[in-house]
Each structure stands twice: as structure tokens, then as C-alpha cells.
Amino acid sequence: MTVFKKAGVIGWPISHSKSPLIHGYWLDKQGLSGTYEAIPIKPEDLEKEVAKLKQDGFCGFNVTVPHKQAIMPLLSTISADAKRIGAVNTVIIRPDGSTEGRNTDAFGFIENLKEGAKNFDFQKGPAIVLGAGGAARAVVHALGLEGASEIRIVNRTLARAQELASAFPGTKAYGWGHLPNLMQDAALLINTTSLGMKSQPELDIDLAPLPTAALVHDIVYAPLNTRLLTEAQKRGNPTVTGIGMLLHQARPAFEAWFGILPVVDENLRAKVLA
Ligand code: ATR
């Protein structure tokens, strides 16, 4: 008989989260006994509500906006990846009540990129990361792990790009105006900003200087085919959409709680996109 396990995702607001759908799909598919629920927690209630999850016998939970950093001081230990990224998106609660924070976003980013662009060579040329927020941090960390030859962080607010670059030796920070020059020899262009997302302004850049062999990746997945990706496709650049990052980042969390590393199949992809 399998043990009944409870997991979930905490955030505020949380009703938009796709995580219950993803983990619920895998629980069903694997025939496991357990639940995964969306748990709304206001910022001011975080400590109290996390203590409650422990008391209620949860084996862990995902963490989303606005708790990814605030959760860190409440945990017993933090993985090296999460420390480096400066945020936790997965918490494991052990039977003795101790807690471990991890971050699976870098894993999700890399798995998605490798799935979407088979045999991509991270040493082929410079990578441009647009944005310097939390998502950019995970992406820059992941690119570093893959041995990317040069990482150029480009952000509207230069100071934020510089702050990120100073945390990751070997990366360089630039203001938006440098983008045309920086694109000329780039092998990879990644949007980590919120631009192009539903109800946000479009990401409006002229791709003309970018080599047509460069891979263009948008971590925005709603809409799936952002303007950046459609413009890139029009000129023949290979592209990777963002939905796989969301799906793949969930896999190591599911494994940590339920003991099986699940796969991302077409059925799951279709359900999340529907
Ligand atoms: P996340 O954690 O999802 O990365 P974030 O920390 O709020 O979110 O970061 C959002 C990113 O999108 C930042 O790089 C932000 O640029 P600034 O640092 O200059 O704010 C970028 N961004 C958001 N709106 C933008 C806009 N209208 N033009 C250019 N960049 C924008």
C-alpha cells in the first residue's frame, strides 16, 4: 500500500497557478496516493501558515510569488542552487519536521532548452540574457552550469544588471541601448523580462543584427508564441518556447516528494496550454 502524501503550492495570489494541474496529472498517471493543492498565503501570514503545513503532515510544497525569498530564513537548510539563485521554489518537509529549500528553475530552463534545441552548443558563442530579475538569476546560473562561453546581461535598469553580473563572475552588464551591437555575434538570445506576456507591453526589439543561426528563447509562455519568437521564426532563427521551463521545473520537486521523476508528455503539455 502506498503512503498518502500531501503537497501543494503557496503564493498570493495563487488561483492562476498551473502547478496543481501539472502535479495532479502526474499523481493520476503514476497511480500515486496523494494530493497537490493551491494554498493562498498572505505575506504577513507566511511563518504561521508554513508551520501549519508542517503540523498538517505535508511532505512539501512549491513556493511562488511573493514568497520565494521570504521563505528562506524559515527553512532548516537551503541547497547550493537555491543559495546561488537567491530564491527557493521547492520545499521538502522531512518526517522529523526539518525543512530543505531547493530551486528547480535552472534545471527547468536547461531541460526545456535542450529538449527544444537538440545538441545546442553552449560554447558556440555569446548568450544574451534580457532582464535582471528573479527569472534572469536562475537563467544566468543555469547558463554558467552549462559552461556558456560568455553571458551578457542586458536590462532597462543598468544598476540591476550590474548587481546580477557582480554575483556571477564572468558575466557582463549592459544597458538596453547596447543590444544591437551585442546581438551581432550572439549564439543565444533569451527573454527573461515580463515583456510580451499577456496584459504586459510587447518586447519590441529589432532582430536585424542577430545572426540567423542564433537560438531565440522566450521564457514567457502566455502567449506561447510571443512576438519575439514569431519575429525570430520569420527570419529563420531556431526558437524555443517557454512552457517547457514551467513543466520541467516541476519534475525534480515531484520526485523529491513522491519518489518518481515524471516525464513531460504531449498530453500534459496540451492540458497546460488549454
Ligand atoms: P521576475 O522575478 O519574474 O524576473 P522581476 O524581478 O520583476 O520579475 O523582473 C522583471 C524584469 O522585466 C526586469 O528585468 C525588468 O527590468 P527593470 O529591472 O528595468 O525593471 C523587466 N521589465 C519589466 N517591464 C519592463 C519594461 N516595460 N521595459 C523593459 N524591461 C522591463
Image (cartoon, helix red, strand yellow):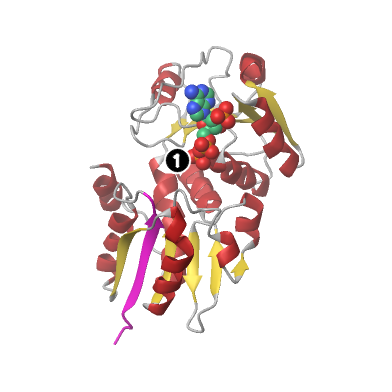
Q: In the image, 241: left or right of 118?
A: left
Q: Nearer the viewer, residue 153 or 269?
A: 153
Q: Nearer the viewer, residue 17 or 272?
A: 17
Q: Residue at x 56, y 53 (%)?
A: 69
Q: Give the quadrant of residue 188.
A: top right
Q: Image quadrant of residue 57?
A: bottom left
Badge 1: how crowded within 10 Å, few (<14), some, or many (20+)? some
Quick check: can you spot residue 149? no
Q: Residue at x 57, y 53 (%)?
A: 87
- Near-viewer residue (108 or 239): 108
Question: From the viewer's perspective, is 175 left or right of 65?
Answer: right
Instruction: Residue 3: say if magenta.
Output: yes
Local secondary structure at mark 1: helix
Up-down relation of residue 198 to residue 105 (above or below): above
Q: Residue at x 62, y 14 (%)?
A: 180
In which quadrant of the rendered image does the C terminus lie? top left
The span picked out in magenta is 1-12
Going by the image, does 89 lie left or right of 150?
Answer: left
Quadrant of the drawing holding the N terminus = bottom left
The x and y percentages for residue 121 are: 61, 39
Q: Residue at x 62, y 63 (%)?
A: 79
The spot of residue 138 in percent (x, y) is 58, 46
Q: Quadrant of the rendered structure where residue 62 is? A: bottom left
Residue matched to label 1:
116
Residue kind at label 1, given as amino acid type: Gly
